[in-house]
Amino acid sequence: MKQAIYGLILFTFLALPPVANLLESIMIMHMHMQMPLLVFAGFLIARFFQLKFPQFFERWNANGVPGMLLFLIIWLYWMVPRAMDEALTSPFMELFKFFSLTFLAGIALRDSWKKLGNIEFSIMYIFFTLKFIIMGYLYLAIEDQICNNYLIIEQKTLGWGSLAMAVCFVIFGFYWHFTDQSEYQKVDL
């Protein structure tokens, strides 16, 4: 139950107008800091809902794939530059961003994470690695301004940040592959 309270505190902190404006003022902080923190807040809050409605999650997300698909759809939607622009200009879209990333994507991720098998986890891992590579390449290769609310230099910074994330994913993938993970998979979230 403490996790849910911490998640709610984090969500409230991120929703404060000065904090939201600061994180949204720089493109890389908007995409690589604010959005993952909103998902993490939902990840923490999810424990409350899992304990309150266990039958719903067992029926709806028995093997973890539907929840992970919901997470992916929401996450990919918010990676679209037009969606980021809309979140900055429309208060309704800003509320939708906070709600969807926290209460839909974060909760779905938490419920699905432990239910995924090794094959599904590997597919997700490869998908996110490729997503960061492609996104980084696109933001670096396109010379035109993609987001109306951000400068081209911020777009390039986001591209390099996405490529750096892809490199970190690849390094972690090698680590994961060449070490024995059986000792570490017994941890209960």
Image (spheres, grey):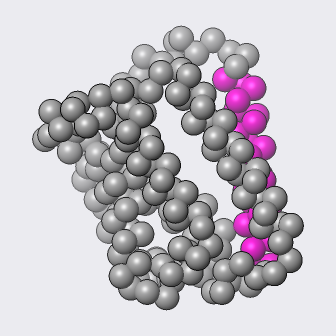
Q: Is residue 159 magenta?
A: yes
Position of 7 compared to 148: left or right?
A: left
**Which stretch did the figure color magenta?**
153-176
Q: Residue at x 53, y 65 (%)?
A: 78
As drawn, is 44 to the left or to the right of 83? Answer: left
Residue 165 in view: no
Relative vertical location of residue 168 with respect to residue 162 in this rendering, above or below: above
**Residue visible at 63% across and 12% down?**
180
Relative to 61, residue 133 above or below: below
Front residue of 93 and 22: 93
Tell me where residue 125 sits by quadrant.
Answer: top right
Most prominent secondary structure in the magenta stretch?
helix
Horizontal side of 59 relative to 80 (left or right) equals: left
Residue 120 drawn at (x, y percent): 52, 27
Whole-percent x, y for residue 115 in the image: 38, 26
Q: Is residue 128 above or below residue 158?
A: above
> Between residues 43 and 75, which one lies in front from this camera angle?
75
Q: Position of residue 142 (x, y in %)?
A: 83, 72
> Residue 189: where, in percent of width, then height?
36, 31
Q: Is residue 170 magenta?
A: yes
Image quadrant occupied by the N terminus: top left
Question: Which residue is pictured at 60% across the width and 31% down the height?
Answer: 123
Residue 187 appears anywhere in the view: yes
Q: Residue at x 36, y 27 (%)?
A: 63
Residue 147 picture quarter: bottom right
| Relative vertical location of residue 188 with respect to residue 41 in this rendering, above or below | above
Q: Please name whichever residue, 40 or 91, is drawn nearer the observer in this view of the structure.
A: 91
Question: Going by the image, does 152 lie left or right of 56?
Answer: right
**Number of callouts:** 0
